[in-house]
Image (spheres, rainbow, N blue to C red):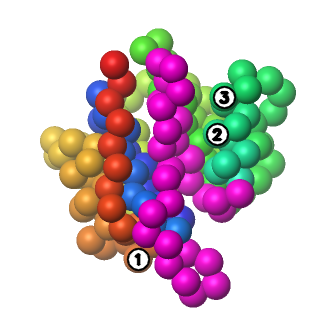
Amino acid sequence: MTTIAWDGKTLAADTLATSNGLRDNKTIKIWRRGGALIGACGSQALCERFRTWVIAGMEGESPFEGADDGNGLVVTQEAVLCFGDNGCWSVSEPFYTLGSGYQIALGALAMGATAKQAVEIAARFDTTTGGEITALSLS
């Protein structure tokens, strides 16, 4: 899966993807589109459908709706929105995490880590988080 962390300023994610026992350490999981940041975790095909859906204007149901294998995140200056199998919800906390290493990253953020540091910490302990850590700032 992956780990994505939002610290109120920066969105960070690992780049590890696995399939049938093979590793790809260059998978992009966060993107910038205009003034928004987009993140997705789960199957690569579903994440790509989510990114395309956001870029197209988020009309209709999110690709994650009804799917239990991932989540998406859209961050703008006005809101942080999370998308999952039960729909969309607004994030009110100053930081947020998604993916297989979310609990580790959330604890790191609560202790003052940056989003990038939180994902690095998650990668130390979560077997499906790894590769390089990418980060995008909202500005």
Question: Does the segment drawn in magenta span residue 58?
Answer: no
Which tag, 1 or 3, sits closer to the chain's start? Answer: 3
Which tag, 1 or 2, sits closer to the chain's start? Answer: 2
Residue 56 appears left or right of 136: right
For label 2, the residue is: 51
Number of residues whose C-alpha sits closer than 10 Å to that of mark 3, classed few (under 14), some (14–19) or many (20 or more)? some
- What percent of the width, then of the height, locates residue 55? 66, 28
For label 1, the residue is: 127
Residue 71 appears left or right of 130: right
Region of the chain picked out in magenta, as a range: 18-45
Q: Residue at x 31, y 73 (%)?
A: 125
Contact between marks 2 and 3 (CB within 8 A): the answer is yes
Q: Residue at x 35, y 36 (%)?
A: 136
Among the 4 quarters of the image, the one containing residue 112: top left
For label 3, the residue is: 55
Q: Amino acid at mark 2?
A: Arg
